Amino acid sequence: MSETRNGAVSERRKVGRTALEVTALGLGTAGLAGLYSDVTENEARTAIDAAWDAGIRFFDTAPYYGHTKAEHYVGAALRDRPREEFVLSTKAGRLMRPRRDAAARAPSNGWAHPLPFEPVFDYTRDGILRSFEDSLQRLGVASVDILLIHDIGPVTHGDRNEHYWRQLSEGGFKALDELRKAGAVRAVGLGVNEAQPIVETMREFDVDCALLAGRYTLLEQGTLDTFLPECERRGVSILVGGAFNSGILAHGVRHLKERRDAGNSAASDLKFNYGEAPAEVIERVAGIEGVCDAHGVALPHAALQFPYAHPAVASVLTGARNASEVRQNVDAFTKAIPTAFWDALRAAGLLHPSAPTPRS
């Protein structure tokens, strides 16, 4: 039987055409900042330590995560590590303004216990530069390796997207270019939940990479047709986030689907892309689970390994709330999966016909 091991966690790929390299598995820090449920500073520290011990050397954060909490946690945990040994990315596009009212620490925007700051969108040149300087101070570093424009696009901004795109086009891109030329950052790009803003940016500005949450997962492969080939052509690396599609590929659906089919009310944790999973997605995940069972493969293992097989993908960012979850993700990323499993998924119509898969 032919088997694959999807590369060591510490395997490295270049970011675009730069000399910068990131590890195959990275650690995203939205969960550590208290997305949906609170995480203590000690829990965050032990999770980052566990990632380091496993060979992860790519850490991604953002001012928005926990309203600056993630950057504080990451900075404290990495401060005594050799700076040249890890890659650090953060984001810009929101300025964090202090709040002094009684509700400043109440749950907000999905953050269970945010710090007392209010996010204000600003993609202007001065806004991006101010956000960057603020991040350096929270992180306790003199530079970051990757700076990403955060959440530009209609999914976030709706009718206001044209306004914010004009800010970015007329000023924000200039800020990225200045920072890169000055050596304050080594690579620049976008951190978004949709592919179209990346396409539009590539037409207008020379980016090195993009962090794309979802859109290229075991459930979603529409980006294979034109988007990923265009990234390859332009030498733009993709950093994959959301490989579990907000959790549905981490937990599966079988246990909840069985309860629903029996007429019992199922728990509402079938999340897909931050919302409740529609019926067609639940059915598709159930089909993938069936193939997993037939080949002795755990669903989270397949979900985490799949995106990294594409040559445009430089790293897969995984979220975690504690050290145990970090170790589970590392195990999932490195566990051997039989080649026959991927062939069976394709034969069942559950995988894009041209999707690259991990091979020996």
Image: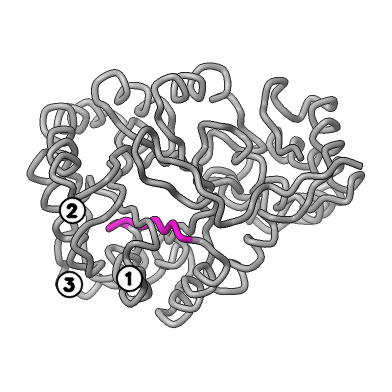
Q: Tell me the crowding category of disc 2: few under 14, some 14 to 19, or many 20 or more residues within 10 angstroms, Cα based.
A: many
Q: Earlier in the sequence, mark 3 or mark 1?
A: 3
Residue 65 in picture, x, y percent from top left: 35, 59
Give the residue type at disc 2. Answer: Phe
Please say if 293 is above or below 283: below
Q: Residue at x 62, y 73 (%)?
A: 324
135 vs 2, left or right, is left
Q: Tell me the crowding category of disc 1: few under 14, some 14 to 19, or many 20 or more residues within 10 angstroms, Cα based.
A: few
The label on residue 54 is none
213 vs 343, left or right, is left
Instruction: Please name the residue that numbered disc 2 is placed on.
Output: 132
Q: Nearer the viewer, residue 324 or 194?
A: 324
Instruction: Please name the residue that numbered disc 3 is placed on.
Output: 101
Q: Which residues are magenta?
A: 57-64
Q: Secondary structure at mark 3?
A: loop
Tag 3 and tag 2, C-beta contact below 8 Å: no
Residue farthest to the bottom, as pictured:
42
Tag 3 and tag 1, C-beta contact below 8 Å: no
Alpha carbon distance from label 3 to label 1: 10 Å
Q: Nearer the viewer, residue 303 or 290?
A: 303
Q: Residue at x 65, y 49 (%)?
A: 7
Q: Earlier in the sequence, mark 3 or mark 2?
A: 3
Give the residue type at disc 1. Answer: Ala
Alpha carbon distance from label 3 to label 2: 26 Å
Quarter of the image that includes the C terminus: top right
Instruction: Please name the residue that numbered disc 1 is placed on.
Output: 106
Which numbered mark, 3 or 2, is in the foreground of this view? 2
Residue 106 in picture, x, y percent from top left: 32, 70
Q: Residue at x 10, y 39 (%)?
A: 125
